[in-house]
Amino acid sequence: MLCVVWGSTYLAIRIGVTEFPPALFAGVRFLIAGGLLLGAARLLGRRLPARRRDWVTNAVVGCLLLFCGNGLVVWAEQFTPSGVAAIFVVTVTLWLALFDAVIPGSAARPTWRQVAGLFVGFGGTLLLVDADLGALREADWRGPLALTTAAAAWALGSVFSTRRPSEASPEINSALQMLTGGVLLTVLGFLLGEVGQVHWSPRGAGALAYLIVFGSLVGYSSYVYVLRHMAPAVVGTYSYVNTVVAVLLGWAILAEPITRRTVAAMAVVLGSVAWVRRASRRPVAPAKSPSAAR
């Protein structure tokens, strides 16, 4: 779900920001998706968090992942080419490995084989979007800066959620995080005066509906679930595959050509994902007690 579904959402975001102002577009998306998911979860008997700690965790994660991470991506796609955006967003995998290694609480540290695999995958992504590397030097600085910050915020929020697991169900956690991000983005949109810039159209409404159903209810809920069951460095490899999916969709829907270099780059990217998945992680040695130290 993460690799295929999220690989298609960049197109929907690009379409959406041509019809709606960015903060309200993203905010309305998460408010609707979060409300629908929360209602469905409650009907299925899922309970709201009983601990204050879980409410705080979901609020922080929602702020980092959706308000900062996704919000900045939506804002940047107003004036950043999709190929350039892919280069920066895929670095979330490297940020995940970094934060997972330096933030206390990990049961294992990434090995040199995993780190090497991450850089090989990043190199494959650069090869895949090589035609857009020239645009990277000429791009509006706001886009690269926003996308770099978005990738770091997304990775930080992801690692934070693994360090403070919630006792609530994944559906409840996803809904509360989406509602947090939706409220913050919508308030920001009102403060920026975006209400007067909204122009409803079938094209924009279709993009919004697609992101609500597939980007949020399916994709984001899957991400929250996967974070509970896999190491952050491994989870982040979805962003590499997203780039491959985007290329294939461009070929299938927009008749964009696939060259030998494209095939080679996709093989490198997918190979790096398999490498990282298979590479064992190094367990963290337990801290010695004061008595043992003496």
Image (cartoon, helix red, strand yellow):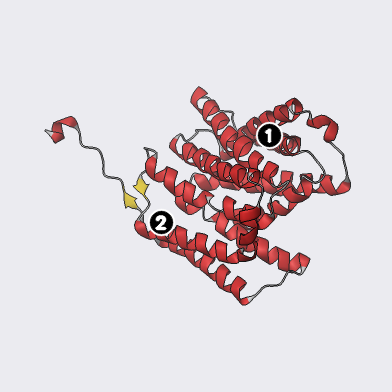
Give the farthest residue toward the bottom.
260
Q: Is residue 274 above or below residue 213?
A: below
- Looking at the figure, which quarter contains the N terminus? bottom right
User: Would residue 81 be found to the left or right of residue 165 on screen?
Assistant: right
Point out the frontmost of discs 1 and 2: 2
Q: CA distance from mark 1 to mark 2?
A: 43 Å
Query: Disc number at residue 43?
Result: 1
Q: Pick the residue in front: 251 or 37.
A: 251
Q: Which of pointers 1 and 2 lies earlier in the amino acid sequence?
A: 1
Give the farthest residue toward the left.
294
Q: Position of residue 80 (x, y in %)?
A: 69, 50
- Crowding near the residue tagged with mark 1, few <14, some 14–19, many ≥20 C-alpha atoms within 10 Å: few
Answer whether residue 221 is visible to the viewer in this image: no
- Looking at the figure, which quarter contains the C terminus? top left
Q: Amino acid at mark 1?
A: Leu
Residue at the disc numbered 2? 115
Determine the residue positioned at 61% across, 77% down. 260
Q: Position of residue 69 (x, y in %)?
A: 60, 40
Answer whether residue 155 is visible to the viewer in this image: yes
Q: Position of residue 162 (x, y in %)?
A: 46, 40
